[in-house]
Image: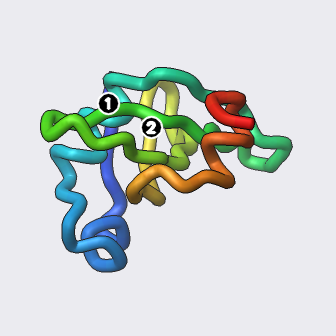
Amino acid sequence: MRIRVHPRVSIRHPEITDSDALEAFENTLRSRARDTYPLMWVGIGTDSKGRLLEYIAVEDEPNGWLIFHCMGATKKTLIEIGLRR
């Protein structure tokens, strides 16, 4: 599987490195598909620092993912994927 991180992630959130985003994706606690085209997945995972990060990724090639959004988990996203009421 090939996973890439869009450069805009660290531009918009300098505290999030590509490694942080990759770890959150690989350490997903929960995710769900959004009703979009192309199909996008929103998820919550942890990085090596123990932070809960939210991400949005799209499968942009066979067995390949592009993470184009990653930041600290928000209440809205936690609710969306069912980790909080």
Q: Residue at x 28, y 78 (%)?
A: 11
Q: Residue at x 29, y 46 (%)?
A: 21
Instruction: Look at the picture and state if 82 lies above or below 79.
Output: above
Which residue is situated farthest in the front direction here?
Answer: 85
Q: Quadrant of the C terminus?
A: top right
Counting every numbered tag in the picture gives: 2
Along the viewing direction, whichever of 48 and 17 lies nearer the viewer: 48
Q: Nearer the viewer, residue 28 or 85?
A: 85
Q: Mark 1 packing: few (<14 Cα in 10 Å), some, or many (20+)?
A: few
Say which element carries label 1: strand
Quickly name the residue at label 2. 65
| Kind of residue at disc 1 | Arg
Q: Position of residue 77 (x, y in %)?
A: 63, 48
Residue beneath label 1, please? 2
| Residues under numbered marks 1 and 2 in contact, where contact means CB atoms less than 8 Å apart | yes
Q: Earlier in the sequence, mark 1 or mark 2?
A: 1
Placement of the N terminus among the 4 image quadrants: top left
Image spot of residue 75 (x, y percent):
61, 52
